Image (cartoon, coloured by chain):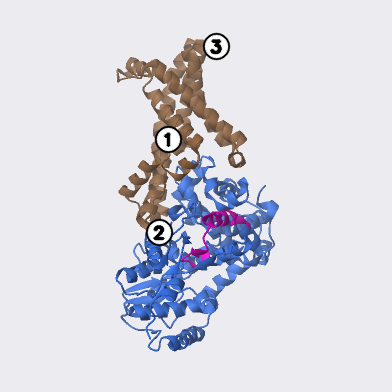
Chain colours: A blue, B brown
Amino acid sequence: MGIQDRLIEDVGLREGVKRLTEDKIEQVVQAVLKGETGARLAAYNEICMRCGLCSEACHFYLSHDGDPSYSPVGKVQQTMAVLLKKKGRVSPDFIYGMAQIAYTECNLCRRCVHFCPVGIDTGYIMSTVRRICHKLGVTPQYIQDTAHSHSATFNQMWVKDDEWIDTLQWQEDEARDEFPSLRIPLDKEGADIYYSVIAPEPKFRTQLIYQAAAIFTAAGVDWTMPSEPGWDNSDMCMFTGDFEMMGRLKRRHFESAQKLKVKRIVMGECGHAFRSVYDMGNRWVAWKMYPVPVIHSIEFFWELMKQGKIKLAKKYPGPVTVHDPCNVVRGRGHHEKLRELVRFLIDGDIVEMASNREHAICCTAGGGVINCGPPFKNVRLAGSKAKAEELKATGVKTIVAPCHNCHGGLEDTVHRYKLGMDIKFLGDIIYECMEKPS
Amino acid sequence: MHEIYNLVTGPLAWLAWGIFIVGSIYRLAIMYILAKKKDGPSLAYMSWGFSLRSIINWLIPFNALGWRRNPVMTVATFAFHICLVLAPIFLLAHVALWDQFFGVEYPVFRENVTDIMSMIVVAGGLVFAGRRLFQKEVRYVTTCQDWLILVIAVLPFLTGILAYHQIFNYQTMVILHILTGEIMLAAIPFTRLSHMLFAVFTRAYMGSEFGGVRRVKDW
């Protein structure tokens, strides 16, 4: 029982560990612990009573029949607790296991916080472990590739500058068959909203940009998208522990919005990017309040609906269940707006999962776990058994999930556990049901 | 015997209280300075309202999700902590000592009440020990420190009960009771018993983050 019994081969972790010595590890761990952590980590480490109450919060623990090495405190015990006890003097092999736990067996979803009487934030501890791994150069290959892409291109998917514009124009062109007046306005100064997406949208979920353009057109929204880097709001560097790059990404995103003098930023249906704004990236660049107001598309669609700007031609057939993405619900309290909006859109009821709203069980994709790629896919899917059971118990055919990561994870889960459910973005449903202008 | 009694009620008592009070102030001050220096991005979001909201909600039994899912642990934790704090403060014999040494007097609980409360502390300790031994997710993470503080916390109550009921040698038990009580006091700032000092702040911080930044409840 423990990480060393279940190590998975990953070229990024293996090559990273090969370059390490105990001296180097000690030096890096000390640098992070002394330079970047403080009373928060010290207090968490000291007052955790090892009561184990957090165990039941974690889907990895629940999905592995109560294997204690998957519990939040069990994961801390195998990683940060050892680093602190040994003052960073650990073996390269230990670092391999530590990285595997931190990157692939914790979604940083923070559900465990709701179970801890003394308020320990395991997500923060695991992020700090990842930070150390990043500085040691031990990161899973796939997620590191996206972090490299951020560094080189300011987007996650190696989308080149001309490809970005080309993709938007391609979607505009496609959409004009259906909506002859549709435009995707680029670099429009002073627009009401700046729409930012994650790089996987132009890369392989292009229909989402099409749908957003269709909805904004139908609702008469004054919107724009930037033609230059900064358009991608995603942030895999936050998840690899490359906080320097995380800060640069947030700065670039906001600066591109400021340059266009927009009133506010609307972020697509993504969760982690939101976390980067309200929680981590903004703090790294020392902004208590970020310079341009940011809202998630749950809020924006909700506003459009409340103001009567979207007219529905039909309602989507229910019942449905709602998956609450950790970063926009437990992270930003959008659960009720989400439900109001869904009730407006569907014909039928919302059947709640056993765990819902701020207590929802994670999709097992978030926190960069799905981004660690194929080597860890089976582990991830084993970890989503608890979610699969909750989904199945609803007995419905449709899951509404306003987060790209959750979509990726839930699609795999639905497939693996043969749940036969469809997963919908809010944009999917609105686009399908709205009155389409001709 | 008298000399040992005088030692534990005299110099050792002063030492234990001294370590407890000065040590606690020292630890809190050092932690605060460290937080100011290193945790600025966290401290900036601290809020009184959300801190109190979180603390109060976690002080209600079966209110938080963590409490609701573990009823045995919830009952044991609340009973253990309430009795552990209140019984020594309102115990007749303790108040008599305050009166004898410093002329301080205040109301007391009836003796059979504090007796039962002490038994509850011991019983709570047994529940915790049972979890450490038999519940695999707790056993997996249990360290020597966890056993040590459990023993430190329970012994003064166990010896107190034995002394009160005059089981074994009364004088020996009283001395052991005082000694273990002093060990507990002195251990608070420097062992995991320091959760007594810090938990209120970690809870307050989490409440502030969840209330002010994340806009949800944290229980």
User: Are both tags, 2 and 1, on one chain?
Assistant: no
In the depicted structure, whether residue B112 falls above or below residue A375: above
Q: Marks 1 and 2: in contact by CB < 8 Å?
A: no
For disc 1, the marked residue is B23
For disc 3, the marked residue is B168
Query: Which chain is home to disc 2?
Result: A
In the displayed structure image, the side of residue A48 where residue B88 appears, left or right:
left
Tell which of B135 and A62 is nearer to you. Answer: A62
Q: What stretch is highlighted in magenta?
A: A382-406
In the depicted structure, whether residue B77 falls above or below residue B65: above
**Which three-letter amino acid code belongs to the residue tagged 1?**
Gly
Chain-order first, disc 1 or disc 3? 1
In the displayed structure image, the side of residue B203 where residue B131 appears, left or right:
right
Mark 2 vs mark 1, foreground winner is 2
Residue drawn at x 63%, y 68% is A141
**Which three-letter amino acid code belongs to the residue tagged 3?**
Phe
- Residue B82: quadrant of the picture: top left
Query: Which chain is home to disc 1?
Result: B
User: Are both tags, 2 and 3, on one chain?
Assistant: no
For disc 2, the marked residue is A335
Mark 2 is surrounded, within 10 Å at the Cα level, by few (under 14), some (14 to 19) or many (20 or more) other residues, namely many
